[in-house]
Image (cartoon, rainbow, N blue to C red):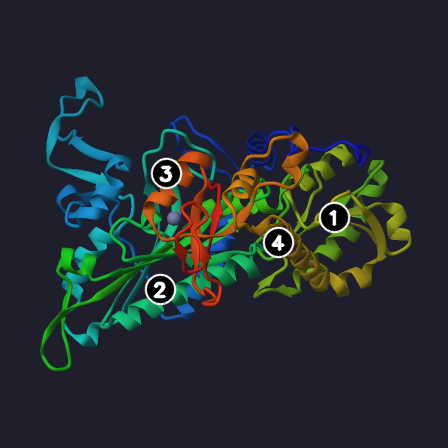
């Protein structure tokens, strides 16, 4: 590793964060833009990360009683229009299919032939189509609760797109549940929020705040939207998952009724909830550094990479053989319900280049092994969570014995670093001048201390919320669920009575 002083990613984070972000994705070979405007191609390194996210969450959903199903990509327009707020909220983002080409004259290639009797919306979310089916499936209280999840793709038309963060098509899971009582549906909304929080913190190593969205930011058609919010390294917030309490809005729109124990008909109470490939953007922006991606071990596609260092062909066989034995020994170990993923990289290329490639991909542990290491029965270890490339030699059997601990140490180090960063950039602010200063640094040196999460009082009015957003492009990310009642104060803008602090930040 000759380039120790140079960083692998240009520009650095502090120079141009958005460009740094694009470069990390490119250098780690995670995804790229496609010929279709706004749609991304997720490459194997990025997709395996998504698969790992999916597998962990899928287990958690199933453990809490949910089952997977699949619903159509197309939603007839009349279904979308059933819930008034919902259709209004998504109207501008919908891609709509209006033509087919059955019976078309072949000479005209793919020109549309016939107009559809009813336009089909490509799902921007599936409440309406799933509601339509729930209405058929639910007859009696015995059919409840219905706890369904779907892994699918979604289309929301976007003009300005960014890989993983905002794309026209993306992958996600959407949970949809129906319950007998309001209480049960609300508990479900909270249960899912907990699952998202635990997943973000334990697996993604990202500390999150939980809370409720304001009316402005609520899911169209929901009574309450709960969310997890994380702080990125540019101190902006990323909404990383949402859990919606839909009350009886969608039940009434789709006529989902059940006969209760007394024989009376009632509408069910529903919820919906989702996380998407956006989480990958969050992992990059929280953990990535000026040398590229930095993956939390519990989700990394590969936890350990072994790089044989060979000077001439005569060394090849016994070096490869030694490396192979280590790979096999590591693969026999279990890390979070899975065997450790090991890559043995035997490609014939410059050792330094090879090593940088894996650093940029963010693999937690890289081993370099050459003839001299083998003589000492040891390995050269590099830990990706360290800011400066730092390597140490270790006896082979000790390395193998301690690998689980090392992976957990890295996992915890990433979480602690992210949490310390968030804490450092979170403050209680009680006057509007300081609030403005916090979000508008005047000197370049201010950049290091300004911006982040402001915990400030808010009167609850949409007017104040909108005014702050217009002035500073700062929004209310969430109203914390556990507000301390004693913490009363005055609205940061209008000075009226507030019931507690809310979280203000710039957001993605
Ligand atoms: Zn106010």
Q: Position of residue 132 (x, y in %)?
A: 17, 56
Tell me the number on the disc at residue 423.
4
- In this view, 33 is above or below 407: above
Q: Position of residue 89 (x, y in %)?
A: 26, 43
Q: Residues within 10 Å of mark 4 (few under 14, many from 20)?
A: few
- In this view, 472 is above or below 67: above
* Residue at image coords 64%, 46%: 294
The residue at which mark 1 appears reads as: 386
Secondary structure, mark 2, is helix
Closer to the camera in the image, 14 or 205: 14
Q: Residues within 10 Å of mark 3 (few under 14, many from 20)?
A: some
Tell me the CA gap for discs 1 and 2.
38 Å
Which mark lies nearer to you, 1 or 3? 1
482 left or right of 231? left
Q: Earlier in the sequence, mark 1 or mark 3?
A: 3
Tell me the number on the disc at residue 48.
none
Closer to the camera in the image, 340 or 446: 446
Secondary structure, mark 3, is strand
Tell me the CA gap for discs 2 and 3.
26 Å
Which mark lies nearer to you, 4 or 2? 4
> Toward which corner of the image does residue 331 lie, by quadrant?
bottom right
Q: Position of residue 473 (x, y in %)?
A: 45, 36
The residue at which mark 3 appears reads as: 169
């Amino acid at each position: 590793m000759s380039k120790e002083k140079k960083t692998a990613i240009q520009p650095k984070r502090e120079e141009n964060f958005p460009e740094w972000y694009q470069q990390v994705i490119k250098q780690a070979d995670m995804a790229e833009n496609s010929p279709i405007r706004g749609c991304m191609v997720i490459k194997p390194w990025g997709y395996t990360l998504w698969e790992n996210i999916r597998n962990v969450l899928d287990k958690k959903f199933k453990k809490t009683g949910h089952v997977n199903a699949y619903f159509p990509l197309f939603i007839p327009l009349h279904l979308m229009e059933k819930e008034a707020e919902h259709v209004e909220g998504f109207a501008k983002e919908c891609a709509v299919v209006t033509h087919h080409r059955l019976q078309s004259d072949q000479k005209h290639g793919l020109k549309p032939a016939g107009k559809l009797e009813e336009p089909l919306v490509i799902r921007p979310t599936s409440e309406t189509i799933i509601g339509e089916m729930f209405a058929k499936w639910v007859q009696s209280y015995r059919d409840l609760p219905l706890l369904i999840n779907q892994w699918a793709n979604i289309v929301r038309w976007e003009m300005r797109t960014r890989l993983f963060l905002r794309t026209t098509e993306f992958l996600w899971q959407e949970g949809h549940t129906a319950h007998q009582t309001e209480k049960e549906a609300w508990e479900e909304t909270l249960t899912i929020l907990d699952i998202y929080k635990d997943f973000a913190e334990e697996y993604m190593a990202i500390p999150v705040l939980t809370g409720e969205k304001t009316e402005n930011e609520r899911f169209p058609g929901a009574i309450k939207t709960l969310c997890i919010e994380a702080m990125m390294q540019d101190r902006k917030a990323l909404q990383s998952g949402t859990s919606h309490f839909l009350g009886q809005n969608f039940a009434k729109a789709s006529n989902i009724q059940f006969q209760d124990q007394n024989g009376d008909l009632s509408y069910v109470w529903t919820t919906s909830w989702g996380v998407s490939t956006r989480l990958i953007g969050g992992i990059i922006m929280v953990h990535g550094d000026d040398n590229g991606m930095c993956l939390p071990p519990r989700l990394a596609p590969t936890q350990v990479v072994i790089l044989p260092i060979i000077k001439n062909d005569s060394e090849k066989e016994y070096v490869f053989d030694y490396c192979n034995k280590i790979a096999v020994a590591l693969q026999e170990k279990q890390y979070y319900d899975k065997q450790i993923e090991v890559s043995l990289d035997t490609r014939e290329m410059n050792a330094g280049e090879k090593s940088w490639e894996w650093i940029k991909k963010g693999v937690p542990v890289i081993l370099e092994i050459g003839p001299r290491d083998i003589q000492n029965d040891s390995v050269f270890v590099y830990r990706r969570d360290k800011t400066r490339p730092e390597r140490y030699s270790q006896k082979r059997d000790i390395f193998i014995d301690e690998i689980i601990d090392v992976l957990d140490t890295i996992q915890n180090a990433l979480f602690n670093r992210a949490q310390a960063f968030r804490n450092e950039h979170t403050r209680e602010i009680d006057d509007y001048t300081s609030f403005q200063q916090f979000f508008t640094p005047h000197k370049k040196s201010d950049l290091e201390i300004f911006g982040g999460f402001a915990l400030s009082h808010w009167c609850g009015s949409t007017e104040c919320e909108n005014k702050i957003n217009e002035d500073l492009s700062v929004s209310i990310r969430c109203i914390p669920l556990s507000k301390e009642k004693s913490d009363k104060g005055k609205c940061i803008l209008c000075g009226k009575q507030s019931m507690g602090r809310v979280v203000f930040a710039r957001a993605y």
